[in-house]
Every structure is written in C-alpha cells, then in structure tokens.
Amino acid sequence: MARYTGALCRLCRREGEKLFLKGSRCYTDKCAVEKRKYAPGQHGQNKGKLSDYGIQLREKQKVRRIYGVMENQFRIYFKKASRMKGVTGEALLQLLERRLDNVVYRMGFSTNRREARQLVKHGHFLVNGRVVDIPSYLLKVGDVVEVRESSRQLMVITDSLSMAEHRGFPEWIEIDIHAMKGKFVRIPSREEIQLPVHEQLIVELYSK
C-alpha cells in the first residue's frame, strides 16, 4: 500500500500550521513551523494569493495529512460520508475519527497517528478481545480497545500514556490507564473533534 515517506515537518510548513504529526516534538521550540513559518521549497517565501479551488484543495490536503490517509482512500471515505444522514463534512470527520489508529492515538497509547498506525500493524492491540492489525478498521460504539498483555511494557506506550494523562482525554472515550484499555463510548460531535479545518470546503471541492 502506498504511503508518504518524506519529512513530516514539510507537510506542516506547507499547510502553514501545526498538524501535530511528530507528537511531543510539536509542543517544543524544535517544531519546524515555529522556526520557519513559510512553505518549504525554493519559492516557499513567495506565497501568492490562492484561488477558491486552491483554498479548497489545501483544506482537503490538510485533513488527509492529519489522519495519514492517501487520496483514493480519502475519496472512499467521502463517498461513504455523502450517503450518511446529516452534514456530509461532519460525517466525514466522524468516519476518520473512528479509525483504529486514530482512536489508539486519542486514547493516549501513542504520541501521534503515524506511531499509532505502526503499533496497530504490529499487532499490539486487541479490539473486543481479538487482535486487529488493520489501522483503518472502523470502531463501533461500545468497542473496547486494549493493549496486549505482552506489549504493556513497551516504553513507547507507557511514555505516551504518561504524557496523555497530563493533557487529558476526549469525552467520547473512556480510559482505564492502569488496565491499559479504553472504550469507544459514542461518536464524537463536530465540536469535540478539535481540528483547525473547514470541512465544508472539502465538500465543495468534491461536489464540482
């Protein structure tokens, strides 16, 4: 499966804001967006005015990069969201939030979604008592995610939990830190998906 293997900080600089793709580094002075607040490349500092299409495209790219989803997969999510009841843009974000790698990140078992995706692929998590190694697996309300017994001493997971405990957890999941498990309580509302995106622009882009 295709995946992005380039520098993550370039993606944040291209969008002109922090996408928190590198976990704890994004909260420090080492963050590339803090050091160089312009797009990467030779002409990065000569940023011109974007057209309406350009603005919509950048918003779509931003969401794709936040969740680590490739273009074809993102289109599938959008088509599925457009068939769901309610607002299409909100349904799209809710689908992306239900991904197993995202929920693992939200539960504090990893410092970023990229790390969560790798941990899931290596089979470190159980969903309702069964090993699931598919990052795009969509969780349902009531599903329980827990760290495998043999993986509970991994430093990457314990350190991530420690940091997440200080930051707090979303209200749409329940966490038992000592048992290293969490429950997907309900679908998050748009207000609870705290991302700096305007999903309606994505709907307009794909509606052309």
Image (tube, rainbow, N blue to C red):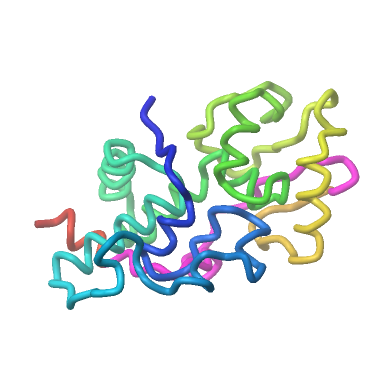
Q: Residue furthest bottom?
A: 49
In the image: residue 146, left or right of residue 10: right
Q: Position of residue 169 (x, y in %)?
A: 71, 61
Residue 156, x across and y down, in percent: 76, 41
Q: Residue at x 64, y 71 (%)?
A: 29
75 sits to left or right of 142: left
Image quarter in which the N terminus is found:
top left
> Which segment is the magenta one?
177-200
Q: Foreground: 179 or 3? A: 3
x, y percent for residue 151: 80, 28
Is 102 located above or below residue 152 in the figure? below
Looking at this view, is 36 or 107 the one in front? 36
Relative to residue 194, is residue 205 drawn left or right?
left
Where, quadrant-wise, is the C terminus in this rendering? bottom left
Residue at figure coordinates x 61%, y 46% from the top left: 103
Which residue reaches farthest front? 42
Main structural element of the magenta stretch: helix, strand or loop?
loop
Q: Is residue 196 left or right of residue 151?
A: left
Q: Is residue 81 above or below residue 17?
A: above
Quadrant housing residue 178 = top right
Q: Where does residue 95 sit, x and y in percent of width and height?
A: 43, 47
Q: Residue at x 41, y 64 (%)?
A: 13
Q: How many marks?
A: 0
Residue 99 included in the magenta stretch of the image: no
